[in-house]
Image (cartoon, helix red, strand yellow):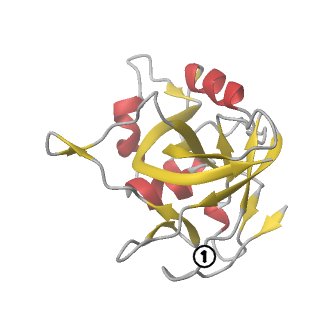
Amino acid sequence: MLLWMAVSTAAETPQPLEVLHDGEALKLVFAAPAGRERPLTIGPWKLGPSLKRVKNGKPERPSDKRYTLYFIAPGTEYQSTATPALDHNLLVNVMPPNDDPIDAEFDLFWVIVLDPDVKKDLRTEADLIMLAQERFVPGDLYALDDAPGAGLLREAFRADSLLDLQRYRRKDGTLPRILILPANSIQHATIER
């Protein structure tokens, strides 16, 4: 378990973070902010600055040409006593083939656990894909706060009630066990073993 409470400013050099790939720990370092850039912040956690990419007047969408970085809530890798609702894991979908680092762009995705019965600490992309395809029937008294990832729903999407999840509910009343949603952020980082 890591406790990370460092406060950074745009002028500071980004500190290495531990990320997971299929359960194996790797080191990730975000690119340093340049000029007026600021790190993407979620609660007390700071990621790298979002690269500004625009196509046809709209922010660029996730691309298969970039790697993927998942911010998974809840998780046990990064914990904060001040905001435990945003405890999370960081996971990437790439492993350096040898000891050479990978310097690349990553599409950031929020992964939010909705099903209270998901007790597993999500540490592999295969787990994410499997759970995103499975559904569950929320109980009659299910509320937004019953979702283990409710803190991230509130922080990243300003969700405040179960009605904010209506678009993900099927006609049979089921919800996905987890949501994987683009954060509309491209992060530049280096990954190494």
- Residue visible at 76% across and 32% down? 97
Q: From what the image shows, is residue 49 above or below residue 124?
A: below
Residue 131 in view (yes/no) = yes
Farthest-out residue, front:
100
Q: Given the image, on which type of amino acid does mark 1 rest?
A: Thr
Relative to 160, is 123 on the left or the right? right
Find residue 59 and report its horizontal and vertical position in percent.
26, 46
In the image shown, does 58 or 28 lie closer to the viewer? 28
In the image shown, does 170 or 75 lie closer to the viewer? 75
Find residue 92 and report its horizontal and vertical position in percent.
65, 41
Relative to 127, is 66 on the left or the right? left
Callout 1 environment at 10 Å: few (<14), some (14 to 19), or many (20+)?
few
- Residue 99 image-quadrant placement: top right
Mark 1 lies on a secondary structure that is: loop
Relative to 11, is 71 on the left or the right? right
Q: From what the image shows, is residue 39 above or below residue 107?
A: below
Q: From what the image shows, is residue 64 above or below residue 120?
A: above
- Residue visible at 30% across and 41% down? 60
- Residue visible at 72% across and 74% down? 81
Q: Which residue is mark 1?
A: 13
